[in-house]
Amino acid sequence: MSDSNEARLGRSVPPLSREAPEKMQAFMVRHGSVLILAGVMVAQLLLLSFQISRNNNVRLIKVWTVAVLQPFQYSLGGIVDAARHGWSAVQNLRGAERENQELHSQLLEARSQILRMSEQAAEDERLRGLLEFRKHQSFSTIAAEVIASSPGENSNAIFVDKGSDAGLTPDLAVITPEGVVGKTIAVFSHTAQVLLLSDSSSGVGCILERSRVQGVLKGDGQNFCQLHYVMNEETVEPGEAVLTSGLDQIYPKGLRVGTVVRAGEGNIYKSIAVKPAVALDRLESVLVVLKPAPPEQQVSSLPGR
């Protein structure tokens, strides 16, 4: 029957080995007396340790137990202390990280406040400059803020936040305390478009400060200008100031327009490059020069009329 089962399973079952029990039995027979003697001695030693007392009535077995377990107790205590200190360090690290994040947020907020205060101070300084400039001028002006610039590579124009509701009309001079910016070319209800000096279609009647030679300033479309119609025989030196002549009936006379940076002879007229006095690509606040009222309006506005 077993042979048929083994054949059916396809493998043979090895017989159980009897060598291990026989070796153990032989070992016990050979060393049995020694083992019995050792067991008796250990039992007597334990009985004596239970009976013998040391100082303060402490059993010897307890002393031995403490002596055996004390190194493990110290090791376990050290592990517990190390774990407690490690956990405390982790908690302190987390607290320091939170404090660091709070300080970082406070630093960002402080920097933001400083930036806002700096911007406000710069704005106040610009407005004070505009007001101080207006006090010393004989013509009337109105302050305006730059709100946009015209799109396009060949267009040099900006939009201001004042329009017809503030009394603006086309062909009004736009200036800053540093000099001429341009003129209004389109006026809407609440805004106006300003053509800058650097536009190629602009034109300003000018005069050289030292030589008093007159010409017409036009833009080159790249934040620089050219002074036209100055004869070759005239002496023009780099660094000479260019002022408005007032002959165009748009810009008041004597306003700074720019500075000569290069002058050379041409066929009939000199080729004179002028750098505008105003940084036209960084405009924020401007003044629009209002035209004086006609004489009949001035008379009608007098008291008693």
Image (cartoon, rainbow, N blue to C red):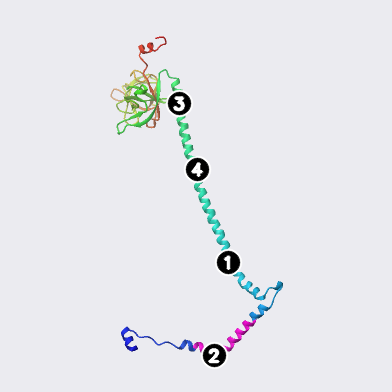
Q: Is mark 2 on a helix, strand or loop?
A: helix
**Is 280 inside the magenta-drawn segment?**
no
First in sequence: mark 1 or mark 3? 1
Give the quadrant of residue 267. top left
Residue displayed at 51% across by 89% down: 25
Q: Which of marks 1 and 3 is in front?
A: 1
Residue 129, numbered label: 3
Q: Is mark 3 on a helix, strand or loop?
A: helix
Looking at the rendered structure, the kind of residue marked 2 is: Val
Q: Which of marks 2 and 4 is in front?
A: 2
> Is the Cβ of the residue at disc 1 closer than 8 Å to that at disc 3?
no
- Quadrant in the picture for the C terminus: top left
For this rendering, which residue is in front, 67 or 120?
Answer: 67
Q: Count residues near mark 1 (Cα–Cα under 10 Å), then give few for <14, some for 14-19, many for 20+.
A: few
- Look at mark 1 in the image and give the residue it sits on: 76
Looking at the rendered structure, the kind of residue marked 3 is: Gly
Residue displayed at 58% across by 64% down: 78
Residue displayed at 51% across by 50% down: 98
Q: Count residues near mark 4 (Cα–Cα under 10 Å), then give few for <14, some for 14-19, many for 20+.
A: few
Q: What element carries label 1?
A: helix
Q: What stretch is highlighted in magenta?
A: 23-44
First in sequence: mark 4 or mark 1? 1
- Look at mark 2 in the image and give the residue it sits on: 29
* Residue lying farthest to the top in this orientation: 304
Looking at the rendered structure, the kind of residue marked 1 is: Leu
Q: Nearer the viewer, mark 4 or mark 3?
A: 4
**Residue 143 x %, y %:** 40, 25
**Residue 192 x %, y %:** 34, 26
* Residue lying farthest to the left in this orientation: 267
- Look at mark 4 in the image and give the residue it sits on: 107
Residue 242 seen anywhere in this rendered image of the structure:
no
